[in-house]
Amino acid sequence: MTEPILSVRNLKKHYPIKSGLLNRKVGATKAVDGISFDVHPGETVGLVGESGCGKSTAATSIIRLEDATDGEVIFNGGNRASETRREDGAHPNDVTEFNKRELKQFRRDAQMIFQDPSSSFNPRMTVGSAVAELLLVHGMDDKPRRRAIVEDLLERVGLSAEDYDRYPHEFSGGQKQRIGLARALVLNPDFIVADEPVSALDVSIKAEILSLINDLQEKYGMSMLFISHDMSVISKVCDRVAVMYLGEIVEIGDVDEIFENPQHPYTEALLSAIPTPDPRSRNEGIELKGTVPSPTNPPSGCRFHTRCHRVIQPPDMEFEQESWRAILNFRDRVAQEAIDLESIRENALGSQDSGSGVTDQAIKSQIRSEFGIPERIEEPTAETAVEEALDALVNEDTDSAREHLMSTFETPCETSKPEQIEHEPGHRSACHLNTSKGKTVELTPGDD
Ligand SMILES: Nc1ncnc2c1ncn2[C@@H]1O[C@H](COP(=O)(O)OP(=O)(O)OP(=O)(O)O)[C@@H](O)[C@H]1O
């Protein structure tokens, strides 16, 4: 296989949290927490995940708009091909270690397209000058030549040469994104990072811009990292996709393979959320409830276990999976002391026929119903623990409710971190359910 144009290895970006008079570090937001993947020449790799998963932070750390906390970003574009590691193990193409001169060259070879094209243009500068400025910064002194190159490029992105002298406010959102593309292409880069380039656009314009990106990518042959929260957008432009959850890559593989045979429950949930009737989507009604937990204090074990519809049951119990998920949600809310007994009492009163006070039994039933826990769980140990926890709760003894639940219900997903398993060459996932479905892989520099 040819050398990747980009190899990201164990990349981390942690933002320190500081507090107190001395501004001491008291924790860290682990926005990107050890991601590894490659982009090959001419390939478009997608990075997908919900808001807050760390996609933009990954992009800005790769392109070095901010400094990574740890890891390597080996960029073999420009004239950097076939470089090898130095004796001390460092790589001359590691962007995270580039000096000023190397960074300037890198800024020529790698470009970024942003979600909101409006904010990335100076309103007092014509769009032509804004694009041509990059040529000037990188040493092209010949003004007529700069103008000719930019006019040609404006036409290639579906605008006209006359647009050179117009100002940003004279263009629609879609047109501005076309100018954004022209600006990203003007230095003839080998690699482009596009961060949600169509998510601010109307549906009809979105399709046009995606098709333009595909055409340009084919014509210029550059490699791309394409960031989106939307699987259907990914399917239109990407060859491969890395699925990101809470700072980590949980699955990576060819787009076709991932759509047809997703191996991680989070990927399944994202695919299931595709709104349009995409023939390749498998809408199985999996609902991704709640939001991404905080990367400051990520869940233990598999970070997705707090929302996973396939979360593994304790070895000695066998449940209806939905009830198991409901019990875990209940357990976690009790542990966080986030059960609002007052509002539950009111809801129970509302659903009661008689006007007399609400009974403990009614409150317990209301809690079961709000969490989706059945009135009676088939598994006796589970039923006893839930009932004891409910009794403790109505007696306002949260500590003992927590103890009943924590000592009975534990999933293997929260006690150990899943390893990366290879299903097919290049298709990996990290889920405890897949341990027996392939061989464990560990990425070392240069592997993919
Ligand atoms: N400069 C910063 N300082 C502290 N925390 C940050 C900073 N930038 C991002 N974060 C946090 O890092 C996490 C990841 O953010 P990021 O913007 O990379 O996610 P994302 O997947 O791109 O989401 P979105 O699509 O909403 O931009 C979030 O919890 C965010 O609050």
Image (spheres, rainbow, N blue to C red):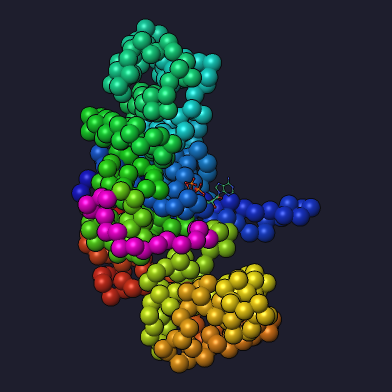
Viewer-proximal residue among 347 and 13: 347
Percent x, y of residue 436: 28, 75
Instruction: Look at the picture and state if 336 lies above or below 54.
Output: below
Q: Predominant secondary structure in magenta? A: loop
Seen from this angle, which residue lies furthest top? 144
Residue 16 visible in rendering: yes
Seen from this angle, which residue lies furthest right? 21
User: Was residue 253 drawn as part of the magenta stretch in this picture?
Assistant: no
* Residue occupying the point 44% across, 86% down: 377
Q: Considering the image in quadrants, where does the C terminus appear?
A: bottom left
In the picture, measured across the screen, residue 393 lies left or right of residue 223, that is: right
Residue 77 visible in rendering: no
Residue 402 sits in quarter:
bottom right
Percent x, y of residue 328: 49, 76
Question: What residue span does the magenta drawing correspond to?
Answer: 277-293
Viewer-proximal residue among 407 and 252: 407
Instruction: Look at the picture and state if 381 lies above or below 273.
Output: below
- Total marks shown come to 0
In the picture, measured across the screen, residue 399 lies left or right of residue 281, that is: right
* Residue occupying the point 26% across, 72% down: 437
User: Was residue 279 drawn as part of the magenta stretch in this picture?
Assistant: yes
* Residue occupying the point 65% across, 54% down: 17
Percent x, y of residue 223: 30, 38
Instruction: Look at the picture and state if 112 lies above or below 259.
Output: above
Percent x, y of residue 391: 62, 87
Instruction: Look at the picture and state if 364 lies above or below 113.
Output: below
* Residue occupying the point 25% across, 46% down: 239
